[in-house]
Image: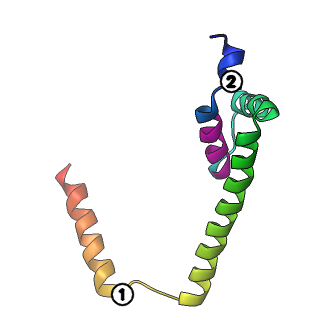
Amino acid sequence: MSPLKNIIYNCRQATFLIEKKQLQKLGFRETIELRIHLAGCSICILYNQQSRIIHEMVKQLFLDSMKTSGTRLDDDFKQELQERIDAELNKK
């Protein structure tokens, strides 16, 4: 299969790039590959739209929960966690 056909017909790669784009900037080649794929795949266009909406909703839920809960870790738990981290670091 030619590289162009591989890009055009590879929805798995396109969905990977769509998700990756939510978290970090895509490279030049990845951006071009995704644009080429989305130019001809209506299913991945819909997936892209839905993925962005879900990502924004989850992000907003997380931010809202951080504002309202005011939850803090208790000092004993923090101390125990620090001791476990130190113990693991000293093993090496």
Quick one: 9 or 76, which is closer to the camera? 9
Secondary structure beneath label 1: loop
- Is label 1 or label 2 in front? 2
Mark 1 / mark 2, whichever is N-terminal = 2
Left or right, 32 with respect to 59, comes to right
**Circle 1 crowding by C-alpha within 10 Å: few under 14, some 14–19, many from 20:** few
Q: Which residue in the rendered view is the most extreme toward the front?
A: 43
- In this view, the residue in front, 86 or 16, is 16
Q: CA distance from mark 1 to mark 2?
A: 50 Å
Which residue is painted at 40% across and 83% down in the image? 73
Q: Residue 52 falls in which quadrant of the image?
A: bottom right
Task: Name the residue type under label 2.
Answer: Ile
Residue at 28% from the left image edge and 64% from the top image edge: 85
- Tell me if 50 is positioned left or right of 71 in this view: right
- The residue identified by callout 2 is 7
Say which of 24 and 86 sits in front.
Answer: 24
Residue placed furthest toward the top = 2
Q: Secondary structure at mark 2?
A: helix
| Amino acid, disc 1 | Asp
Neighbours of disc 2 within 10 Å: few (<14), some (14-19), many (20+): many
Q: Residue 42, image x and y in percent?
A: 77, 39
Residue 71 x/y as whole percent: 48, 87
Residue appearing at x 63%, y 28% in the figure? 10
Residue 40 screen position, x and y as percent: 79, 31
In the rendered view of the protein, which quadrant contains the N terminus?
top right
Region of the chain picked out in magenta, as a range: 14-22
Q: Point out which mark residue 4 bears.
A: none
Q: Which residue is mark 1?
A: 74
